[in-house]
Structure formats: C-alpha cells, structure tokens
Amino acid sequence: MQSTESQVISTLYKIGSVRFGQFTLKSGQISPIYLDLRKIISYPDLLQNIADLMWGKARNCQFDLICGVPYTALPMATALSLKRDIPMIMRRKEQKSYGTKQKIEGVFQPGQSCLIIEDVITTGSSILETIEDLTAAHLTIRDIIVFIDREQGGKSTLENQHYRLQPIFTLTEILHHLLEAEILPPDESTTVQQLIVEKST
C-alpha cells in the first residue's frame, strides 16, 4: 500500500501538476520541470491529503492564525483551517482603494502569531512580501510551511532572516518518488535521472 506521500506525488504527476519540458519560472530561470499546483483545487481528496501532510509539520509549531501566500497556497491554507478549526486570515496582493482599504482580511489582534502556508518556494520573494504585510499589521511570524521546496536558495534566504521553514517535500524527493513509482515514460524518466544527478553534484 502506498504511503500518503507517495500517493500525493503520483497524483500530482497524473493530473499534470508536475510537468517536464522547458519552462520559464517567475524568477526568470529556465527549468526542465514545472510545478503547476493551481490544478489541485479541482481535486478535493488531494487537497485534503495535502492539508494532512501540512498538519504533520504545523502541529509542532505555536501559532494563533494561518495565512496562505496568494494565490495558489490559499486553498491549502483553507483546507487546513477547515479540517483543524484554525482561524485564517488573507493577504491581498493589492490594497483596495475603497471600503475598509485593508491589506489583511479576517479577524486578528496585534501581537498574535501567524503560520504562513506556501505552495512552492524558489527564491522566497513571495513569502517575504507576505511577511512584510503581516508584520506591518503587527502580527508575529516565526514558522512557514511550504509544500514543495525547489532547493534554489529560498529556504536559506528565510532561515538567514531567522524564520523557520519546513517543506513537505523537496524537489529531489519528488523526483525520487516519481522514479520509484515507475509511472514515467522513458524520455521523462531519463530527464528525472539527469536532474537527480545534477542536484547531487
């Protein structure tokens, strides 16, 4: 019987959330692998499994609220909030010019601690933007849980600023899982083996 971790990774590949080819990332880097986690919103069982994996890390942290980095991590944070009865707040990417004009939506008090949820970390820039807005609202940030760490320096950047980042998976772990699952066509299996070699050197 497959573990939850293996099931999640295999499902991500089968629904096209892990793709191989040539892709330009947000950072401008060219990559042979693309992680399109926006698709998970159409698979409730997968989303719940991801929330369970995140809770495995979150239960060791101390926090009052959770906040997903907009936008792909919002469904993950919502699933975790609903399943574990944890209050959630939401950060707007752009501040409204009408109504309350709030950047942070939801109910919170200055001094409360907030756990940040992110889908993928590359450089860490999106997380740092979220931290900036949350701290401007007088919230405390200590812990960040990321679904996938692409292992391209983001984790070190955040840890150097004294934040604790816990990934559910590293990209290397995902590549190994895909090879072991024997679900890749020959050309993609070759690509994955090359990527593993490159990451180990």
Image (tube, rainbow, N blue to C red):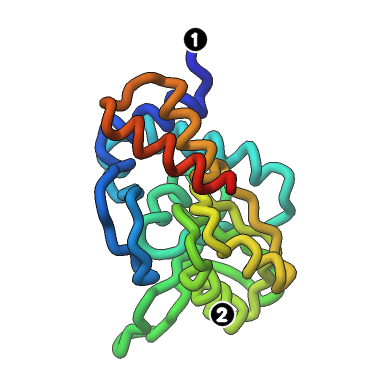
Pinpoint residue 38: horizontal percent, then vertical percent: 30, 50
**Residue at the spot 51% in from the left edge and 28% down from the top edge:** 5
Residue 115 is tagged as none
Spatial CA distance of label 2 from label 1 is 43 Å
**Residue at the spot 26% in from the left edge and 54% down from the top edge:** 22
Q: Please, what secondary structure does the residue beneath circle 1 have?
A: loop
Q: Is residue 82 visible?
A: yes
Relative to 153, residue 38 above or below: above
Badge 2, how many Cα within 10 Å: few under 14, some, many 20+? some
Determine which residue is flagged by label 1. Answer: 1
Pinpoint residue 50: horizontal percent, then vertical percent: 47, 37
Q: Nearer the viewer, residue 111 or 177?
A: 177
Of the numbered discs 2 and 1, the one sitting upstream in the chain is 1
Camera-side mark, 2 or 1: 1
Determine which residue is flagged by label 2. Answer: 132
Q: Amino acid at mark 2?
A: Glu
Q: Please, what secondary structure does the residue beneath circle 2 have?
A: helix
Q: Amino acid at mark 1?
A: Met
